[in-house]
């Protein structure tokens, strides 16, 4: 059975990898997963979702959830595999095809032992994780009401293939995105005194922003302010009217997150007055930091160890994850699964070691079964 299931899951994974879809456009991916789940007589819930699906296995009072994401990224693939992306400029550079396939395998295994389950397992195939909105869409359907614990996975290419990693407390960073528009006054490059140069303002912002972490935030805090885009001007002999900057803030502490946002606003207000320009800040708050429940994090590692998986306590990571929105509603743990590298997430040469697919499905099924038993024993 395991050899047949492994072959089947690899086939599904290859197809998902070949036809990646961007956030909120996972229509074919949703249909493919739904078709495969229904082939195995797994109950797909009727929910008001444009993309993504939730299934339910088992019955009874107790309930837990598993979550895997399904969207891809706007990256041109550079991996030399026969199942490479057929969509120009789109690839699964974050491994969500693996997450979805592992959850499919877990659903099949749980269905086989459905009569033994001590409750219900709802498995979420979530859209739009890359834009940070998919979890909120799932929550809004009400499908997670009365769920007693939730577990999610993400592959980690910095870990050896197949290692199960977890930790209590902050695991991923809170993510904020900002863009800054500077409106000044352009002029001929030979007569700068006739204008108000936005490039000077832009340069000043870049320089002062570097002091936020180094001089305003306690050195014990892991925080990042990164400027990632700078645009201005059209040609060599014109001082432009406008300039644009964009960047991101990563934090693991709510207070520090608020402090950095305040510092950025204060800096921009001061520069705006100093240089007599108009500065508009567009602040887009993303998901908060994933905060793993201590008990469920330990439980996730114990299950891995009991079933002879290699496991370890890992360090927190500055990546973002909208799984954190679920944790604002219920306890749970986000788990990293080693995918073997060598290229990092979001790299055009990123590649999953497919040998981890079936073991990951087995682990997730065992985790769900054991979690329901644990809840039943605690409440009986």
Image (cartoon, rainbow, N blue to C red):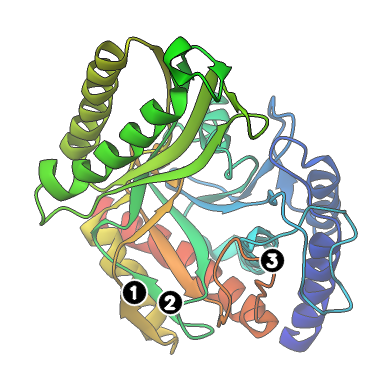
Which one is in front in this view, the residue at disc 1 or the one at disc 2? Answer: 2
Query: Tag 1: Cα neighbours inside 10 Å, few (<14), some, or many (≥20)?
Result: many
Q: Is residue 180 visible?
A: no
Query: Tag 3: Cα neighbours inside 10 Å, few (<14), some, or many (≥20)?
Result: many
**Mark carried by residue 301:** 1
Coordinates of residue 74 in the picture (x, y in percent): 72, 49
Measured Cα–Cα span from mark 1 to mark 2: 7 Å
Q: Is residue 1 above or below residue 226?
A: below
Q: Is residue 55 left or right of residue 78?
A: left
Task: Check disc 2 and report the residue beneath it.
Answer: 164
Locate residue 248: give its quadrant.
top left
Locate residue 165: give its quadrant.
bottom left
Coordinates of residue 376 in the picture (x, y in percent): 34, 55
* Residue in the image at 60% along x and 29% along y: 233
* Closer-to-camera residue (281/105): 281
* Closer-to-camera residue (335/178): 178
Task: Check disc 3 and report the residue beneath it.
Answer: 348
């Amino acid at each position: 059975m395991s050899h047949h299931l492994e072959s089947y899951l690899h086939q599904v994974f290859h197809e998902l990898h070949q036809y990646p879809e961007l956030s909120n456009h996972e229509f074919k991916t949703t249909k493919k997963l739904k078709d495969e789940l229904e082939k195995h007589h797994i109950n797909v819930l009727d929910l008001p979702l444009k993309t993504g699906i939730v299934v339910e296995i088992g019955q009874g009072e107790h309930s837990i959830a598993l979550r895997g994401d399904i969207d891809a990224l706007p990256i041109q693939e550079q991996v030399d595999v026969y199942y490479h992306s057929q969509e120009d400029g789109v690839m699964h550079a974050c491994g969500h095809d693996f997450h979805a396939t592992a959850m499919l395998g877990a659903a099949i295994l749980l269905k086989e032992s459905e009569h033994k389950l001590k409750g219900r397992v709802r498995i979420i195939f979530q859209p739009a994780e890359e834009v940070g909105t998919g979890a909120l869409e799932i929550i809004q359907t009400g499908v997670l009401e009365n769920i007693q614990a939730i577990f999610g996975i993400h592959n980690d290419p910095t870990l050896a293939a197949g290692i199960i990693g977890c930790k209590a407390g902050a695991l991923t960073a809170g993510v904020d995105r900002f863009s800054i528009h500077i409106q000044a006054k352009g002029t001929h490059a030979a007569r700068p005194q006739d204008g108000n140069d936005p490039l000077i303002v832009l340069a000043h912002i870049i320089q002062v922003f570097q002091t936020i972490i180094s001089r305003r935030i306690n050195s014990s805090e892991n925080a990042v302010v990164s400027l990632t885009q700078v645009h201005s001007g059209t040609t060599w002999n014109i001082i432009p009217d406008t300039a644009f900057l964009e960047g991101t803030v990563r934090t693991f502490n709510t207070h520090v997150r608020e402090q950095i946002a305040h510092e950025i606003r204060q800096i921009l207000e001061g520069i705006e007055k100093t240089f007599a320009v108009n500065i508009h800040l567009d602040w887009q708050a993303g998901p908060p930091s994933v905060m793993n429940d201590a008990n469920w994090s330990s439980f996730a590692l114990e299950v891995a160890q009991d079933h002879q998986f290699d496991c370890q306590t890992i360090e927190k990571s500055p990546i973002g994850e909208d799984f954190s929105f679920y944790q604002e509603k219920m306890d749970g743990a986000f788990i990293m699964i080693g995918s073997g590298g060598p290229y990092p997430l979001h790299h055009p040469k990123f590649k999953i070691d497919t040998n981890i697919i079936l073991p990951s499905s087995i682990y997730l099924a065992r985790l769900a079964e054991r979690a329901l038993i644990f809840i039943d024993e605690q409440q009986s």
